[in-house]
Amino acid sequence: MRLTVNGTEHDLDIEPEMPLLWVLRDVLGLTGTKYGCGIGQCGACTVHLGGRAVQSCQIAAGDVDGPVTTIEGLGTPEAPHPVQAAWIETQVAQCGYCQSGQIMAAAALLAETPQPDAAQIDAALDANLCRCGTYPRIRAAVRLAADKLREG
Amino acid sequence: MAGMGKIARRGFLIGAATVAGGLALGVYSLRQPYSSPLSKDLPPGMAALTPYVVIDRTGVTLITPRAEMGQGATSIQAALLAEELDYPLDAVRTDPGIPAPAYYNARIVAEGLPFAATDTGWLAETARETGAMVGKLMSLQITGGSTTVPDAYDRLRMAGATARAMLVTAAARRLGLDEAALRTEAGAVIAPDGTRLSYVELAPAAGRLLEPRKVALKDPSDWRILGKPMQRLDIVAKSTGTARYGIDQTAPGMLFATVRTNPARGGGVLSFDASRAEAMRGVVKVMRLPDGIGVLADNTWRAFQAAKAVEIEWGPAPSPANTEALFDSIAGAFETRRDSRLKNEGDVEAALAGGADVEAEYRVPFLAHAPLEPMTAFAWFRNGMLELRAGTQIPRFVIDTAQRLSGLHEDLVGLYALPMGGSFGRRLEDDFIDQAVRLAWAAEGRPVRLTWSREEDMARDFPRPAAIARGRGRVEGGQVAALDLAIAAPSVSASQMGRLGVPTMGPDTAIVAGAWDQPFAIPSCRVTGHRAPETVPVSSWRSVGASANAFFHESLMDELIHAAGADPLAERLRLCTHAPSARVLEAVGQLSGWGTDPGPGRGRGLAFCLSFGVPCAEVVEVTATAEGIRIDRVLAVAEVGRVLDPVNIENQIQGGVIWGLGHAIWGELTHAEGRVEQANFDSYRAMRIGECPEIVVQALGSGGPVRGIGEPPVPPAAPALANAIFAATGQRLRSLPLARSVRFV
């Protein structure tokens, strides 16, 4: 099976029904994508598939039909993506465990809707649970990221 | 064996931490201190000044022994040290250090003592000092009870100042100058002629000095770091997917493990058939564990699949079968022995002899911690040693557990404490570490990473106990005249400490915390605790007893104030005996525009709770819409004595409000046939971003003891919401979760 993740093509000998989440984490060692529920309820496993935000625990490896981007492919500590830079500046994270998924969902939203209103932000991130309760800061960070992206 | 120990200690540290050993270094300036855990072998060029500051050729590492679970513990510990050390916060490295008696928590015992935070009398203060000694004697290295900042505030600043003084002495000797002529700035000692000696070059000489007996602390007006917004040290890693939690640990040849235990806890395994599971791809081993089975495989998903494929005949549930029976058991406690009556002012019986104006029963359910990272642990037996890596609030108990299971000497068990993907009290238990050790033992030299499924995590939580309260009261002349509150709940302290092997005595203050200790002078006031049987094992859940008892107390107060025809804010202020609490109430009144017309269909609810020494008041504003209750806005004010990091405090208060509201609306664990009925986040609902109201926060720092903020914002949220719904609709809600009674938008 062939998977393209963060621009790198991988030839994998795995069961097609293995969820993409576990291929990323345990086979490819990309641990930035998190497991939280396994049933598409928490969004901690959100990645981009062909540019769309998807919950990787709900997609079988055999059904992956496009290039995958994970949090590691979005940006790095040295060169963070504008959404990540906004997350850092806004000091969003507490435990931080859900934030990879939150950031991937926000980045997909802003790629499609560069100037989202409050309702659009909430709708795009409603699948992403944060037990620490960082939602007020997430909203602020998405708005800041929109500004950053607009200013280039 | 002693030689092995040294090797083990060094081995672990090189493998796991940036701190590779440490140097024997005299006396830390607390009276009769424990020796520094950094006081063993030390590589050349490295110095350990106090148990908290390590300097080598590459810079400064600060030891931050309180665990990071999202509350910002690592950053605030580092900031307290760096402030007095005069070292730039963004240049430090941090390390959780070796779990050690030197890192005991002097405040954790005091939190459970039967003295209200407002009581600063001789007896209360003496008991607190004794509590600190108990924490020290038992070397309780525990993160919890919002004690990290209160415990660290003086201690870590002293450590930073001590290390700084040693560096200054070393510089004075080298330069042949008087210490008083030298100053420090950004990691260097500076002489009057501008000569700069970096801490790195001074460290070896400083490390040979005795620690000074006395050091002076900076005046807060001279602070460069504390009291100002600071960037969390973990913020970049947590924003780029590069933070490494328990679930992310790796090592060459690692096996991926999971467990499946009896969903009716304690029922045991009668028999199991693993033949189908063992034939599945990637499965290495299926083994029996206490109350269940464990699977070792070559990835987590394959382990999950195999665990499901094991055919297991479970033993029967040992605890009452269902929610009704569990509540019956709690209600029965009202008729049995009284656990405490810590408040008994005036004459409640006489005041209520003519009948009560309000008489009501309140209930709260069992609740799960459900941190987003499920229970995880890494364990590796090799060369006669055991290496553990895990997120835990109780590192020394974890080592005890591992030692007991393995039979290894303490020096042969190493634990590297990891940041946690949430905890909320869940990782005050070490059941998952116990399993990881057993699995690693069976893996014969290969490293093992254990990951629980969410379903396992929900089934095997140690929940916040359900509780029932019976309240009565009387009003007179437009004022609250009598309040009588009896609370029945299982004892968290006895359940939890029992599992840790720590004896508990006397009443469990958690049964009544947040109710008996409130700063209101009601002429006749009584709070009684009744201890219900344990039934299911229970544990500390963010804000512990106050999470339930503030709902009871503040709902009853609201009912009484309404019956008196008084204003909820004005009447609380009239009754309030504690200046900081009154300040908080006044501030939340101003912030919310209390007293102005909220508008049609809208209502404001107020609640207050003094918990963990922090008075916190919250106003919730709701609108009763055709689709249900909508929460529009929350105003929250807390007094912490001194605001050390305004950004983190705002984040913690907002998070605490969201935690409190979400669980008040939806949170509930129910039981059937001895099993928890909620298996995942579809049935155990939490607040989502679209449901989150605007939350306006004001943190006061008006002096007095410096307090922690992780828990105090939680207790007022539920009663403030219920009181707001009453104000908007006239419907009084006395049972949580509220979504059972009303619809929410």
Image: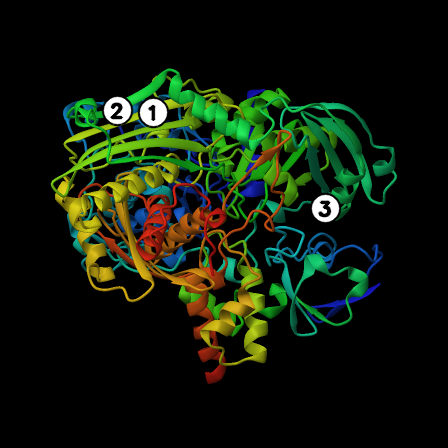
Could you say whether the residue bearing mark 1 is in a helix, strand or loop?
Answer: strand
Q: In the rendered image, which quarter is residue B160 located in?
A: top left
Question: In this figure, which residue is indicated by the disc labeled 2?
Answer: B342
The quadrant holding residue B259 is top right
Kind of residue indicated by mark 1: Gly
Residue identifier under label 3: B300
Outermost residue toward the front in this view: B354
Labels 1 and 2: the sequence-earlier one: 2
Output the chain of dot 1: B
Badge 3: few (under 14), some or many (20 or more) residues near its Cα, within 10 Å? Answer: many
Looking at the image, residue B106 lies above or below residue B302: above
Residue type highlighted by circle 3: Thr
Give the left or right position of residue A15, taking residue B47 as reference: right
Viewport quadrant of the N terminus of chain B: top right
Marks 3 and 2: in contact by CB < 8 Å? Answer: no
Q: CA distance from mark 1 to mark 3?
A: 45 Å
Quick one: B51 or B667, which is closer to the camera?
A: B667
Relative image position of residue B697 (x, y in whole percent):
30, 58
- Residue of label 1: B529
Sequence-wise first label, 1 or 3? 3
Q: Position of residue B433 (x, y in %)?
A: 59, 33
- Between B324 and A81, which is closer to the camera in this rendering? B324
Tag 3, which secondary structure? helix
Q: Nearer the viewer, residue B625 or B683?
A: B625
Does residue B376 appear in this view?
A: no
Q: Nearer the viewer, mark 1 or mark 3?
A: 1
Of callouts 2 and 3, the N-terminal one? 3
- Residue A117: x and y in percent read 46, 77
Amino acid marked by disc 2: Leu
Alpha carbon separation for disc pair 2 and 3? 50 Å
Label 2 Cα neighbours within 10 Å, binned few <14 / some 14-19 / many ≥20 = many
